[in-house]
Image (cartoon, coloured by chain):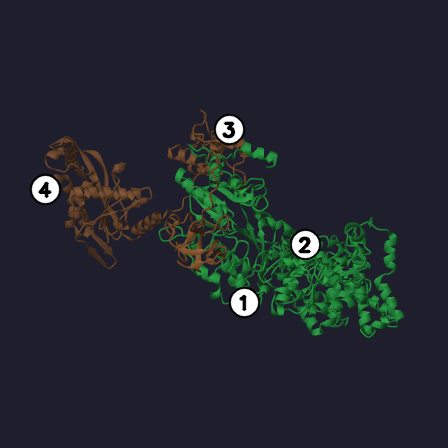
Chain colours: A brown, B green
Amino acid sequence: MATAVIMPRQGQSVESCIIGKWHKKKGDKVSEGDTLFTYETDKATFDEAAKVSGEILEVFFEEGDDVPVLVNVCVIGEPGEDISGLRPEGSSAEQAGGPGQEAELIAPDKKEDYPEAQTAAGQNLYVSNMPEGDASNAPMSPRAKALAAKRNADLRFAEPSGPKGRIIERDVQKIVSEGHLATFAAGMGHPAGVAGSGIGGRVSVADIGRQPATSVDVSIPESYEEKHSNIRKIIAKSMHESLSTMAQLTLNASFDATDILDLRAKMKKAKENGMAERLGLSSSLTVPTINDIILYSVSRVLKTHRLCNAHYYPDKLVFFNTVNLGMAVDTPRGLMVPTIFAADKLSIAEISVQAKTLAADCQKGTISPDFIKNGTFTVTNLGSLGVESFTPVINPPQTCILGVNTITTAVKNVAGNAVPYQSMSLSLTFDHRALDGAPAARFLKDLKETLENFSLLLMQ
Amino acid sequence: MTKALHIDPSEVRKPGFIEFTPIPVNQYNKTIDDEKQNYSKDDFLRIYRDMRYIREFETMLYTIKTTNAYNGIEYNNPGPAHLSMGQEASSVGQAYLLDTNDYIFGSHRSHGEILAKGLSAIHKLSEEELDTIMKEFLDGSTYKSILKFNEGKGKSIKELAVDFLIYGALAEIFAKETGFHKGLGGSMHAFFLPFGIYPNNAIVGGSADISVGAALYKKINRKPGSVICNIGDGSMACGPVWEGLMLSAMDQFNTLWEGDMKGGLPLIVNVMNNQYAMGGQTRGETMGYDFLARIGAGVNKDQMHSERIDGYDPLAVIDAMKRKLDILKSKKGPVLLDTITYRYSGHSPSDADAYRTPEEKAAWEAQDSIASYRLALISAGVASEDDFNAIDETVISGITDAVQLASDPVISPRMDLGKTPDAIEKIMFSNRKISKMEDREPEVLMSKEDNPRVQAIARKERYAYDENGKPYSKNKTYQLRDGLFEAILDKFYEDPTLVAYGEENRDWGGAFAVYRGLTEALPYHRLFNSPIAEAAIVGSAVGYAMSGGRALVELMYCDFLGRAGDEVFNQLPKWQAMSAGILKMPVVIRVSVGSKYGAQHSQDWTSLVAHIPGIKVAFPVTPYDAKGLMTTALNGSDPVIFFESQRIYDIGEQFHKEGVPAESYEIPFGEPDVKREGKDITILTIGATLYRALEAADKLEKDHGISAEVIDARSMVPFNFEKVIESVKKTGKIIVSGDACERGSYLNDLARNIGDLCFDHLDAPAVVLGSRNWITPAYELEEHFFPQADWFIDVIHQRIMPIKGYTPVRSFTDVEMIRRGKLGV
């Protein structure tokens, strides 16, 4: 009867062995004790001797094969015997387990049955709701304490989620994100508002006891420091350079915004009542903002005021045949000025979409550096913040920057009657090195007239 | 274990008798007249002078200890003084024939041996050599004190050298900076290498196995001279002494070591048999050997050439030494000498002699070695009373001068630890990189390229994963044991003094197959199996390194560390600093932390050694780290306990994507390594716990959205906290984990320091997650003992940051901590 020769198991941890050398081959006669093959574990080399005599009927693995232990390696028997039942599944069996896997331990019984599990789970450790009232006396981790002090978090809103009702970092982060910041007076009486006398200013128990109940809290610092972010450093440098090297002055002018406001009102209405669709305009049409309208107008008016669409260098001026319009965007990281390239070639709708996308990218901080350079003229808008007039600072080497102010109600004399109208003012700062007052004023005048007759511009 | 020696059952089972040859007892019986042909008058008188120096030196110390003064010089010596009045003839007789190539090692009672060996060396060295030695020693500061003090006295260099010896030894005893090693060793740890005086030792029998290492060094590196191990009769029951004897008498020196390496060790184990082990009488009370010399008969076929000699007669001792040194020269060592002597003083000055009678002391004093010798020389007409009186005068004035010098706080100041607070700190480690201890061709049997293991490793994958991130099979992966092997093999081919030994180191290839491939590469004398004698394995490595070599020894299981307790805790770590940095200790001890094998084979005792000042401790758990740290350890000059884990000898490199470099590289000790970056919690691990921490980090990320940073300590001493601080500043939370039983472990040390260093950044106390304070149970139960991945999540939930919706299995509550504390479990 055919006898299979298995790969022996040399030690508990051995999962497989490599066949080093075959001393016999298929068809060879072997006697009991003859060395069949050598095999290696990661620790040693062994010889496998035949335990029966006969002919090698089949060899399942070759030299160098990594054979799982206890798998049949070859068969010894009499010629003609059926060995099909002894063939291992695939002569290069899959390796089980990779390096780095510690042997798996025998699965324990259901862990829920462990007494320890019951004590451990029995505690309601995740305290998401504190008892009614003030949590500001709850124990608090040093890290949470430091964060609370730094962000002036109002700990009365803390919901301690640490072990044993401790306020931990995530609880303070939550307070801060929900906007519960301590006022000056509210800072009194809880640990974040106590002057520490311990090492490194740590608050000790004694410090808390020492606080006079009605005293003004002196522990809230009058000021605190924050290192400049990189973007702040860049803004500071370029703004200072701008003001210290240029001869900047600002012209202010206001225009009658009736036309653009009427137009926007009409567009909104048309979109709402389906008129826009009936006129064959895209359903996704967006109503341009006042800023979009100003950007659009500027891009057109600049075409005839080359000194305003230029770069100033000590020895020359560079004029541009296209308008790359910079638009100032306020972001959490600081001021950013993305560029709408070739704005003079874009429609009002295109400008509107681009302005919206660029502003969003700046807010997210995902704006590509390629989009925050090469502007030829900049528009900055503080109108939404109620500013009526200001002196914007030029983004060098540009020659001008236009500030957009808020809309106010003004009165004009129409046939002897005081007629109120919506007025909007513009503040143009220009570099007197590059151009004189009159050309700048002319640009402003043209822009004013364009905006007052904006619907005509759309007929272009 | 060797296939070269066949164990024949018919031979082994044959009946017969073991025959012993008679052991000589005090067989020396020559008279002074007989000896006149061997000694000149000067020789005879020098023997007397040397004995007198010792007697006076010890008497002086006794007087100072008991009266705070000697010859009118006041001094208080609070330190130890184990005196040897009565034992002078044994010391002087021993040293008489020895030269500076011969090393002596001593016990806590070795002032006499040190002085005798020093005086003998001074006699044999030329004035020029002496001048150089004194000028170079400690930049000549000790010599300068001597020269200044003796200005205008017209002393010869030899006379100055005697003063130098006595002053250096006394200043050392008085803990003065001008002492032989700046007063950092003191009475029980004094030595002076230029005269072949190796350390004496405060631990009873401490020198026994250390001396074997020194003898191994001489033999293996073909250095001239012999090694004399002086221990007391009280040490004969100490395990490490027996282990040292067994190691020194291994059959393989004759049966397996080849060529000129065949033959026994050049070692004399000389027992200064003063008949007392502190207060216990060794013969008749605390031992059963009757004659100590009998022990030699139990050690080897040569009976260690053992004999009892009369240590009260210097000439009898010289006679014995002459014969025994010849035996060593003919490579028939080791030798055991039972040198009978007696101490007049107590064990120490605080000893009230309650255990012996005044009559007994008087009887020995009546036969006092010095007085008898003097009388014999006078009777034989060798010298006159005047000759002896002149010597006595020189001796007393010399000792008085030494006391005056050594007690003077200006000439002989103590180390000023107020002004130089880092003086001891700087010598705790020598921190040198010495790639080879000696510059000669290392003895190897084949080229590295021909080595079968090297060839096998060449076929392996040096990074654990293929390009698709699939792990290679174990057998195809370059494993941690391969990393260790490569570092060790490289060093064997670089440092000719490097030896490796321990249990199963040859043939078997080490119990964990790290040394597989070394047997083929190295001759027996560079890689050999030792007896199962952990104390002697470590102790001899200490002696080997002290003598100038580099040793790599193995203790197999960490649990066996206790068997080498004194050697690991007292000898290995202390000698560099006690020697004021004169001695180097390039010893690497490989210790393998087990698992699966129960309570006495699965313990992580890293904390025990991390606690001891003066040892570097590493525990790498990746092939890249193992190779780099082993290379650093083997390049260094400091003792290293190098821990390995049996869980992961076969693990592949999972972190270093470029794979483990084939060339040699170092990873500095003390730098933990971030194995996985994260932002919410830090896990710092020691040892193979790393892999369970990484598993926990995976689960935390996947199931709970918590990002864990996992840092592998890699080494424990030294340890740079900076990387951990940086991580905790980021995460605010830390778990320190390892497989050591939690109580009293180094994990607590790390956690406490991190708590201090990061207090204001912590969102919860630093948490320690160790093994339970139990026995290690069977493999199948280990998941309840060693920290597991789930434990990390349980402990985070309960002690750091409760996780919404999580139900822990293990309890890490306050109540549980207090309960365990109360029970001591």
The answer to whether residue B149 shows anywhere in this view is no
Q: Residue B629: horizontal and vertical position, in percent?
A: 51, 56
The secondary element bearing badge 2 is classed as helix
For the C terminus of chain B, give its image quadrant.
top right
* Tags 2 and 1 both on a single chain: yes
Q: CA distance from mark 1 to mark 4?
A: 97 Å
For label 1, the crowd category at 10 Å Cα-Cα, with few meaning under 14, some 14 to 19 and many 20 or more, is some
The secondary element bearing badge 1 is classed as loop
Q: Which residue is mark 2?
A: B240
- Tell me whether circle 4 and circle 2 mark residues in contact (CB < 8 Å): no
Q: Nearer the viewer, residue A135 or A413?
A: A135
Marked residue nearer the N-terminal end (2 or 1):
2
Is residue B345 positioned above or below B769 on the image? below
Q: CA distance from mark 4 to mark 2?
A: 108 Å
Q: Residue B447: horizontal and vertical position, in percent?
A: 49, 67
Looking at the rendered structure, which numbered label has been put on residue B487? none
Q: Which residue is mark 3?
A: A213
Marked residue nearer the N-terminal end (4 or 3):
3
Q: CA distance from mark 3 to mark 2?
A: 71 Å
Q: CA distance from mark 4 to mark 3?
A: 72 Å
Q: Which residue is mark 1?
A: B444
Q: Which residue is mark 4?
A: A459
For the N terminus of chain B, give its image quadrant.
bottom right
- Tell me whether circle 4 and circle 3 mark residues in contact (CB < 8 Å): no
